[in-house]
Amino acid sequence: MSNLYKKDAPFQVIISFKKYLDVLEHIKYNDRLEYRVNYAESLIDKTKKFPELKDGFEDVSLLEKHEELIRLLLADLFPTGLTNNEIKAASIPLSKITFNYTERFKDILKDAGKDFEIELRNIGDDEFYVFCCCLIVQSYFKKDIRSTMPLYYDIPNKQGIMKHYKITVNSDFTDIYPTEKAQIPTDDVLDMLLENLDDFRLWKKYFPPKSWVLKGFTIISLVDCTTEVALSDLKSSMIQIDPEDLAPDENLIEIFKSYFDVAQLNFGLMLFNKKDQKLEKIPIYENLFTNHILDFWINTFDEETRKSTFENLNNNSKAIVISNVDKMEQEIKDQPSFSILKENNINSFMVIPIMRDNELLAIMEFTSPIPNSLNGLKLKRLEFFTDMILFSLNRFSFEKNYQIEAIIQREYTSIHDSVVWKFRNEAEKYFNASLAKKIYTLKQISFKNLTPLFGFSDIRSSSEKRFNLMLEDLNKQIECLHDIFSLINSDSEKYLLALEIFENELNNEIKADTEQRFQRLLRDEIHPYLQGELEVRTPKEIKAKISDYFDQVFIQTGLFYNSRKSLDDSITLINRKLADMLDESQVKAQLIFPHYYERFKSDGVEHNLFTGQNISPDLHYTSKVVHQLRYWQLKTVCKMEQEIQTFKKDLPIPLDIASLIFVYNEKIDIRFRMDEKRFDVDGAYNSYYEIIKKRIDKAHIKNSTERITCPGKITIVYFGMENQKEYLQYINKLQKKDILQSDIEFLKVEDLQGITGLLALRVSIV
């Protein structure tokens, strides 16, 4: 009977009262008490007029048609004396259709609202199907199995608080038997099925839909277990507090409402920062938690009082419970910050310190607009999950520290994933020695015979732009000061003269210390004077100009910074874009062969790669790896150039980059420098490579004043024709992919100090 279930089931369901009528027949012929015999005989006679009650029916509307007769028939199972206490009803087995309710059950459903539909809680379609099959195995095959799946109804009360009811089912008045199309599994098959409870398709194979008949009715009894279910949900939610989880449990407040049985409730939690002696919000719950009382507390007391309060909590961590805010002491009500409570409609609250090893870990609050809704009894309930809160906060603290360490590793140190195994090996030896109370000296970390790859994308003319924008900022600042002093009569002449001298110096014969001397004049004389003018009776027009002037001053330097800030912001955005592209592409490059990788940001981004057998001794390394990485590097740098051409249009100040790749065939050794916490080339011989890197940055084409790097073009610097041939093949590939143009230039690089014979290829980006 499919309309009885929303879910697929192995049953055809027939509603029948036959098994209970059989009980009445037994009473009629066997009971020695005459009134019970007469009672049973009377009910049997009444049902004879409606044979469908005994034979069975599938039309649910008959339940309503025979409602009064069914109530009389089941009177022994639903005693009148218990109707206002028991939550009980008859039901169609395993369906949402219930009938013949006790008065208490009727009241619960009435409070839930006429649109409320009763449904089993958290049971999926597949899970429901297997559960039905287990009933067949237990009832028909007499297997002694116990279902581990508890059944619940979630029903809201009149105040909107979700109440949770555990369901117990009495199936004494049901029969289960197979239809003609049913399979009868062997004991071995049943054992196999019970070992695979999560294999829905397997169960459906041996128990096809509607292949069995479930005939009769059940009696369901409900027990209010709201506190237990809410407590379980709370524990699950608290376990999930995780700095990496950016989607906190939005149901947490609703769970608290059910647990405390308070219809209107808010919750707040703040961590205690022991170092700074202050409370801090948990970022991922900032929008979910309220913290009204904690805000009130923080704003009520001065800093010294707050610190002494936190210290006292270590000795007396008793919770604060205010059932009715209106009954608080008048002295507290007179505090200005008391308005926080009234503004947020708080009429009852609890503040609970959370302690660990006699030290304050956090403080949580519960608030409600309903007076007297929170009290000592509600506080007592917190004892049942205090340990879980401690566990959750400890875990949060551990995860937070772990993530901070990870950020430090990622952002501030150079220990790349590809080489961390060697550091781990040394650290493990050191740790094991310390456990055994032995002395172990950490060994030097180095990698030998590596092939280097180097490249940079330099922001062109950034120093020149910065100088010009510095002049623009300082001239504008002098102009603003000139306007102000022109309106001020006293002392204006000497300042106007000083400004004129600096303006002339800036725009004609600027000196190395001009900016520093101007800063000193501003710091020691002009700014104190103008701030004094703001304090005395100065005309509003002058005060407005002075205020506007200070709004434009960069606090750290005392200088105007707007123009240079636009440049610095542009450089920062380009650097971030280039670094992100490089880092993202690096993930694919590591799949070619693990290699050491580092990058640096200044006015542009430069990167170093070192690859070789020593980086990953367990993997097979060939010269082909170097060729693949060199092609990857060229392709990546080209894409970075292309991206910046589009990206620069949205910058405060459009900037160009010029990219270069240096090809070096000699092997390099690198060593981790403990003092600088980074890798560096090892030995005097290898330093030649570093010298070349530094000197080709601003090198020119031989016998020319033109630099070898050029915006919109990729420059590849190398020694010898072998490298030229290799890179022409890479360029040809990228030309076919419409990444590079066909205008290849063959250049000679000017002789640099101690460096001769460098060649270069230069080609334009599409």
Image (tube, rainbow, N blue to C red):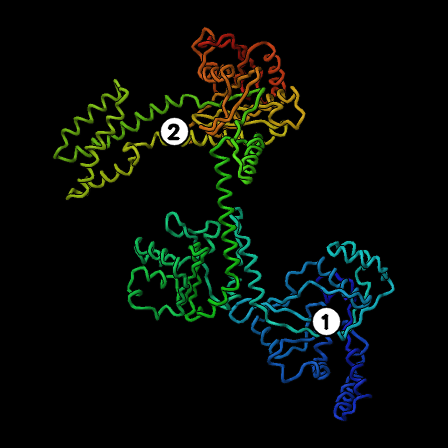
The amino acid type found where label 2 is placed reads Leu
**Label 1, label 2: how far apart the Cα atoms are:** 75 Å
Q: Residues within 10 Å of mark 2 (few under 14, many from 20)?
A: many
Q: Residues within 10 Å of mark 1 (few under 14, many from 20)?
A: many
On screen, 281 above or below 615?
A: below
**Quadrant in the rendering for residue 516:** top left
Q: Position of residue 64 (x, y in %)?
A: 70, 77
The amino acid type found where label 1 is placed reads Ile
Q: Is residue 3 left or right of residue 506?
A: right
Viewer-nearest residue: 43 or 628: 628
Q: What residue is shown at x 50% (from left), y 66% (from top)?
A: 381
Q: Position of residue 375 (x, y in %)?
A: 44, 69
Q: Is residue 279 left or right of residue 709?
A: left
Look at the image and tell me in which quarter the N terminus lies.
bottom right
**Quadrant in the rendering for residue 4:** bottom right
Look at the image and tell me in which quarter the C terminus lies.
top right
What element does badge 2 sit on?
helix
Report which residue position mark 1 lands on.
92
